[in-house]
Amino acid sequence: MILGNGYGRFAASVNSLVTVLLCLLIGSGLMGMGQAHAQAAPIRIAILGDSLTAGYGVKPAEAVPVRLQAALKADGRNVEILNHGVSGDTTAGGLDRVDWMLADKPDIVIVELGANDALRGIDPATTERNLEAIVTKLKDAKVTVWLTGMLAPRNLGPQYASSFDGIYKKLADKHGLPLYPFFLEGVAQDPALNQADGIHPNPKGVDVVVKNLLPFMNKSLDDYAASVRRPARP
């Protein structure tokens, strides 16, 4: 009886220890699953833009945001790119849409606006004020901002072009923003890469835009990951 009681107490102690260890292991596993799930959440990138973002004249699957997301995923990036492009939109229109876009809770916003301002000959000072207001509003909302530049049509004269073209670097320097200098780099004025209007990229042109954007996107994503202590390639 004494031996039996001793064994029973020993067995109970072992069972209690095993139970504690199992709880710790299960708890650690659940915590690890939670961390893995958190790391698996994609980086949400919204592009606030005009027809160049919206995908004017091409199929929805051929728009820049869709193709760019696919290219980044092929590079191992866990991203979701939200298309907030509106054809014909100016910087004033983009400013009006900021709150609506923020409802999607993006981590990063790429501002792609200004082409329609230049096509309409809007005073570059007005364009600059609108873009700065957009940037300020996004920063106040604790959203990371990246900027893409645009060039004015040369038929508006050298003074207008100089004033307009310089807006983007000025704002990028002032606010410390990553800047992709010209959204249509390698595509503008190439008939083979544009639609009949000579302004909007065709599907081949979209592919060139995306290809040229990739180095900027990858570097900026690495910098973003470092700033929020997130794996560079989630």
Image (cartoon, rainbow, N blue to C red):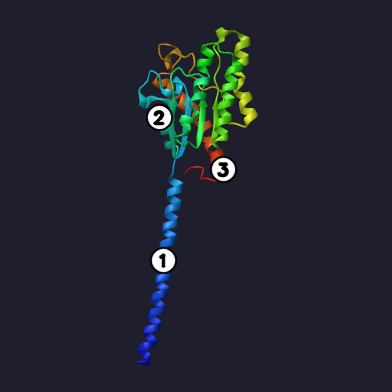
Residue for badge 2: 66
Look at the numbered discs 3 and 1 and tell me whether their residues touch, using CB distance below 8 Å. no
Question: Height in image: 134 above or below 79?
Answer: above
Q: Amino acid at mark 1?
A: Cys
Circle nearer the N terminus (3, 2)? 2
Q: Amino acid at mark 3?
A: Ala
Residue for badge 1: 23
Rendered-image quadrant of the N terminus? bottom left
Look at the image and tell me whether residue 184 can be seen: no
* Whole-number angstrom distance, CA of label 2 to CA of label 1: 44 Å
Q: Amino acid at mark 2?
A: Val
Look at the image and tell me whether residue 147 can be seen: yes
Q: Nearer the viewer, residue 40 or 109?
A: 109
Residue at the far bottom in the pictured view: 1
- Where residue 201 sits: x, y (%)? 43, 18
User: Would you identify the image quadrant in which residue 179 lies?
Assistant: top right
Look at the numbered discs 3 and 2 and tell me whether their residues touch, using CB distance below 8 Å. no
Circle nearer the N terminus (3, 1)? 1
Q: Which of the numbered marks, if any, corresponds to residue 226?
A: 3
The residue sitting at 61% across, 21% down in the picture is: 167
Q: Nearer the viewer, residue 67 or 34?
A: 34
User: Would you identify the image quadrant in which residue 15 lies?
Assistant: bottom left
The residue sitting at 57% across, 22% down in the picture is: 130
How many residues crowd around disc 1 within 10 Å: few (fewer than 14), some, or many (20 or more)? few
Q: Which of the numbered marks, if any, corresponds to residue 87?
A: none
* Side (left or right) of 59 relative to 230: left
The residue sitting at 55% across, 7% down in the picture is: 155
* Side (left or right) of 158 relative to 116: right
- Where residue 74 sits: x, y (%)? 42, 36
